[in-house]
Structure formats: C-alpha cells, structure tokens
Image (tube, rainbow, N blue to C red):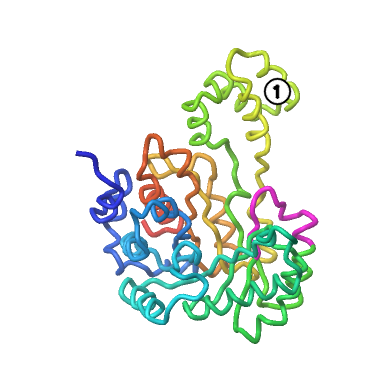
Amino acid sequence: MDMTRRDFVHAGIATASVAALSSLGGMAARAAPPRHKIKRGVATYSYQEDVMVKQMSVEDMFREMSDIGAYGFECIAEMMVPDFPNPSNAWIDQWHGWVDQYQLVPCAYTQFIDSMRTKHHNLTVEEGVQTMLRDFRLAKRLGIPKIRCLIGTPVDILEATLPYLEKNDMWIGVELHAPIRIDGPLMARLLKISEKSDRFGFVPDFSIFQNAPNPFLRDRLIRDGLLTHAAAMYIENSWENHVSQAKVVAEVAKMKGPPTSTNYVQTVYGIATQNPRDLIPFMSKCRHIHGKTWGLTENCVDPAIDLTPVVAALIEGGYDGIIATEYEGQRMMDDIMPFSAMEMVRRHHVMQRRLLGEI
C-alpha cells in the first residue's frame, strides 16, 4: 500500500539521514560547540509543497524541525499564518504554544514587498513602507525580531524604512542571492545604507557559493526529455575546462537531441562561485543565513554547493545566528521522490552537524 505524505510526516521516516540524526535525542541536543556561535535552523519554505497540498500542517513543521534538533526557524507568513496578515488572537496563542512545546526559536520573518501586486501601478515608496510596517506588526505578534527582505526589494523602499526600525525594535536583512555579487554595485549601495543603521544588514544565501552543476536539475531535464545525457556531460566537462560558452552552444546544437539542450549551457555557465571569505569584513551585519540546497546525496553531501570553506569562513568571521536550511529541489525530484523535502532537510542537517563539529 502506498504511503501518503501525511503518513510519512507522522511516521518520522527518513532513509539515509535517520540514523545520524537519531543520536540528537530530539530537543535535547541543541547546544552549539564552544568554538563558534552558529546554530542549525530551517526555512519553512523547504516544506512549502507539502503544505500546499495539505499533507503537512503548521504543527507538523514544528514537530519535524524539533525532531531534527533545529534551534530555530524562518517563517513564511503567507504560507503558515491563516487569515494573513491579521490572524486571530486565538491562533497567535496557539503559535506561541507550539513555540514553547517544541522549544524552537522563531528567528526570522520573510517579507515579500510584492511591488507589482496591482494592475494599475507599481507600489510607491510610501505604499512599500506601509507594506513593510504591516509585516513588522505581524512579526512582533509572532515574536520574531528579524525580517528577511528579498534581493528584489526596491532599494528606495528599504532606505525609507530605516527610521522605523528602532521604533519597532526590528532588524531587516537583505538577501544576498545569486547572481548578485558580493563585490558588485548593488551590494556597494546596500553597504552604504547599512552604515546608517546597525538594524540594517544582510542575509547571505548559499546560492552565491554554488561551485558545481546541480545534478538534480540535470537529471530532471533528462527524464523530461529536454536534455540528453551526452549533451549534459559535454556541457559540464566543457565548463570545468573553461571552453568558451559560444563554442559549447554551437557544438551542442549539432548533437542529436532536443533543441532545448542548449538551454543547459546557459544554466551551467551561469555558475559564478564567490569567495565566502568576502563576507568576513561585514560579518557583523549578517544575522541570518539561508542554507540553500537543491538536494544532497545519500551520504549527506551537497554535490552543487561545497559548504566546507563557507562554514570555515563563517566561523572565522564570528557569525552568530542560524543557518536556515532552505531546500529548493522539490520540482526536480517530485516525479521520483515525492517525499523529498523532509529527507533533504534532514540530510542537510547531518552535513551541517559534521561541518560544525557536532558529530
């Protein structure tokens, strides 16, 4: 008999990762090693597909995060909060009950400015500020002190929000997400804004440290008939050996296979690994981190993002906060592994435990 996602949630089943995580002892094992202040967490976006199809509830997420020994989590309010942005007081009480019961810290709130949500105009700066303040109010009701803003949030709205941070006892961090460069012009502008307030900073996303092609995406494209294995291997080998992109596009176009194979050239050649040590000069402005992953092997290794130098740089820079695992590989795996979210988040935490010296 086939197991539903809800059966999977309540059974607490995980394949490669369950043995390694079992030694955590659930909520008991949360103390970070003394050599650093980094703690493990989860971005609840990781479970969004299971929530969308109503096979995972808000409490199920709390239960799962607690079970893997997460210290804290990042809230996606539109996904988790009924009657957003004005949930009932009774539901807010239930939320705080779960926080206490599962001993989890709500560390960050994801804010979507949604500047194009009307058909008639993009939000004005004032409308954007009011949207931000709306989310401040909800975050405070949820007991969340930090706001994560997407990299697409208009800079003028971010700057106009600065005067409200102290008054609302709130910190906001802009996500540093690929393809944004740590040494690029947008980052330079944001750094100038951060000099005006210690309540304004950054949320590095591990996508900026991708250092190899994503095999989960590649294999899904092959299964869907959009790419051939031969073309994929040629593209990846050419990228690794610094063959020009134009030449690779021309060669792939000559191969037998779907014309969409050339799209994978742009995907692979778009990888631009950044140096994690470049975060160190402004590490004190980074108070939340997105642990992006598209999936891990059964040995709990991320084949696309090597975190070994990243974690080393975070420790050296004195990062004090959580790494919130953000699994984004659902649509790459749902045809062959429909329960991928729980398993991949667990694998990511096994990997983090190794790198953080917990095991």
Q: Give the residue at x 43% y 38%.
A: 333
Q: Is residue 158 shown above or below 348?
A: below
Q: Give the residue at x 80% y 56%.
A: 185
Q: Amino acid at mark 1?
A: Val
Given residues 92 and 329, the one toward you in this image is: 92
Q: Tell me if 143 is positioned left or right of 203 in this view.
A: left
Q: Tell me if 83 is positioned left or right of 172 in this view.
A: left
Residue 198 in which image quadrant: bottom right
Q: Quadrant of the C terminus?
A: bottom left
Return the x and y of residue 272 as percentages of the image width and height.
68, 42
Q: Which residues are magenta?
A: 174-188
Q: Circle 1 sits in a helix, a strand or a loop, which is it?
A: helix
Return the x and y of residue 31 as percentages of the image width and height.
38, 70
Residue 128 in which image quadrant: bottom right
Q: Give the residue at x 60% y 83%.
A: 169
Q: Give the residue at x 64% y 29%.
A: 263
- The answer to whether residue 223 is seen in the rendering is yes
* Residue 186 part of the magenta segment: yes
Given residues 9 and 56, the one toward you in this image is: 56
Given residues 230 and 87, the one toward you in this image is: 87
Q: Quadrant of the N terminus?
A: top left
For label 1, the residue is: 249
Return the x and y of residue 69 as percentages of the image width and height.
35, 63
* Residue 165 part of the magenta segment: no
